[in-house]
Image (cartoon, rainbow, N blue to C red):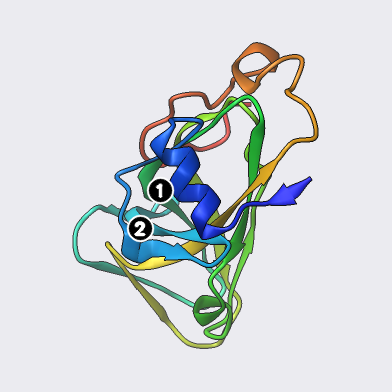
Amino acid sequence: MAILSDRSIIKLVGSNEISIQPFDKKNLTPNGYDLTVEEIEIPEKMKSNKGNITIPPGERFAISTKEVISCGEKHCAQLWLRTSWARKGVICSFGKIDSGFKGNLTLLGFNSSSKNVDISIGNTFAQIVFEELSTSADELYDERSGNYQNQKGITWSKE
């Protein structure tokens, strides 16, 4: 499995083998792409797609990405919290983005610090790192489970 460079990401986006919509070249990193905040929610308290939300200490939250991501049959991806957020006390748990997935991403976080953390719509929050599979998958995400295929906005557990 190989991690894709910025050059490879541009080439694969150009050939529609992977998709990042909208694509902004300034979000490209040497080996990934920075994802931006489109919507923020603190469960049962507040939700916004404008301005910012203050995450109190000890509070969990969800973010939806502005970008719609699509991994082709030979690619998957992993997510990494931008270190600027980790330095403020944000902790996240991310899953792997399966081959064949398409949709906005819901990113779940927790403010572990003793201070409020402000998150604004339009901030970059996480980096997506694409990987090339050694072979094409036998069955893509939508064929195996597809629970969150084509999701829009923040999507909580369907179970």
Establish if 91 lies above or below 61. Answer: below
Looking at the image, how many numbered discs can be counted on the residues? 2
Residue 16 x %, y %: 43, 30
Could you give the CA–CA distance between mark 1 and mark 2, rounded to whole angstroms?
A: 6 Å
Q: What element carries label 1?
A: strand
* 6 horizontally vs 20: left or right: right
The N terminus - image quarter: top right
Residue at the extreme left = 50
Label 1 with label 2: CB-CB less than 8 Å:
yes
| Residue type for callout 2 | Val
Residue 64 x %, y %: 40, 48
Q: Is residue 98 visible?
A: no
Q: Quadrant of residue 25?
A: bottom left
Q: Is mark 2 on a helix, strand or loop?
A: strand
Establish if 40 lies above or below 98. Answer: below
Establish if 125 lies above or below 1. Answer: below
Taking the spot 43% from the left edge, 40% from the top edge, the residue there is: 13
Taking the spot 58% from the left edge, 22% from the top edge, the residue there is: 147
Q: Mark 1 points at which residue?
A: 64
| Residue type for callout 1 | Ser
* 152 horizontally vs 80: left or right: left
Establish if 18 lies above or below 59. Answer: above
Label 1: few (<14), some or many (≥20) within 10 Å? Answer: many
Taking the spot 32% from the left edge, 48% from the top edge, the residue there is: 23
Taking the spot 39% from the left edge, 38% from the top edge, the residue there is: 14
Towards the viewer: 41 or 67: 67
Q: Name the residue under label 2.
A: 37
Residue 148 x %, y %: 53, 27
Label 2: few (<14), some or many (≥20) within 10 Å? Answer: many
Towards the viewer: 81 or 32: 32
Give the mark, 1 or 2, whose residue is nearer the N terminus: 2
The C terminus - image quarter: top right
